[in-house]
């Protein structure tokens, strides 16, 4: 499963980056934590695997009509909470945690800050995959690969060139 967020396409990239495309070719599921910007991103990702996502604060009306602000995705025997994480007050991570504070989820996927975060020493696992196309002040572009067997394993994938 591939997790990504904040693609901001086509403003930040005209195409999905090659390191991401290589992983998408073997994906069985794709999760997007918002700020797609256009439906074309969903359409392209859907050519690889089923896609579940949420809307972000910069998405068009077309995207907000397709996706909720938060959702729970069941994958294998695990539940993944997905939210963009924008809002006022607190940190993005705290807003993401708060969005699922009354839910029994195994992993919370969020975006918004473009800062990769992986806290896999707790439950729920906390994951922000960063951005595959808009690294902002980060050193690398990034996304995540999630493997679910009896446990959840998450790998952040970093690269320098789109």
Image (cartoon, grey):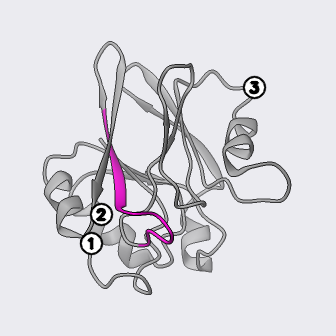
Label 1 belongs to which residue? 16
Element on which disc 3 rests: loop
Label 2 belongs to which residue? 45
Q: Nearer the viewer, mark 2 or mark 1?
A: 1
Looking at the picture, does residue 103 appear above or below residue 50? above
Quadrant the N terminus occupies: top left
**Residue nearest the observer in this picture, 114 or 102:** 114
Q: Nearer the viewer, mark 3 or mark 1?
A: 1
Res 86 → quadrant: bottom right
* Residue 49, image x, y percentages: 25, 52
* Badge 3 or badge 1: first in the primary sequence: 1
Decide whether residue 18 is among the magenta residues.
Answer: no
Q: Which residues are magenta?
A: 134-146
**Residue nearest the observer in this picture, 103 or 98:** 98
Q: Are marks 3 and 2 in contact (CB under 8 Å)?
A: no
* Residue 159, image x, y percentages: 26, 60
Label 3 belongs to which residue? 102
Q: Are marks 2 and 1 in contact (CB under 8 Å)?
A: yes
């Amino acid at each position: 499963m591939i997790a990504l967020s904040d693609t901001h396409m086509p403003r930040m990239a005209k195409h999905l980056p090659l390191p991401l495309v290589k992983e998408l070719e073997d994906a069985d599921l794709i999760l997007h934590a918002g700020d797609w910007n256009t439906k074309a991103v969903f359409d392209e990702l859907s050519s690889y695997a089923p896609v579940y996502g949420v809307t972000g604060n910069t998405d068009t009306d077309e995207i907000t009509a397709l996706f909720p602000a938060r959702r729970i995705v069941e994958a294998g025997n695990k539940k993944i909470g997905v939210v963009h994480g924008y809002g006022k007050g607190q940190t993005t991570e705290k807003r993401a945690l708060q969005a699922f504070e009354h839910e029994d989820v195994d992993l919370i996927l969020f975006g918004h800050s473009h800062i990769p975060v992986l806290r896999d020493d707790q439950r729920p696992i906390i994951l922000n995959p960063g951005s595959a196309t808009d690294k902002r002040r980060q050193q690398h572009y990034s996304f995540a690969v999630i493997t679910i067997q009896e446990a959840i394993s998450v790998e952040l994938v970093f690269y320098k060139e789109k």
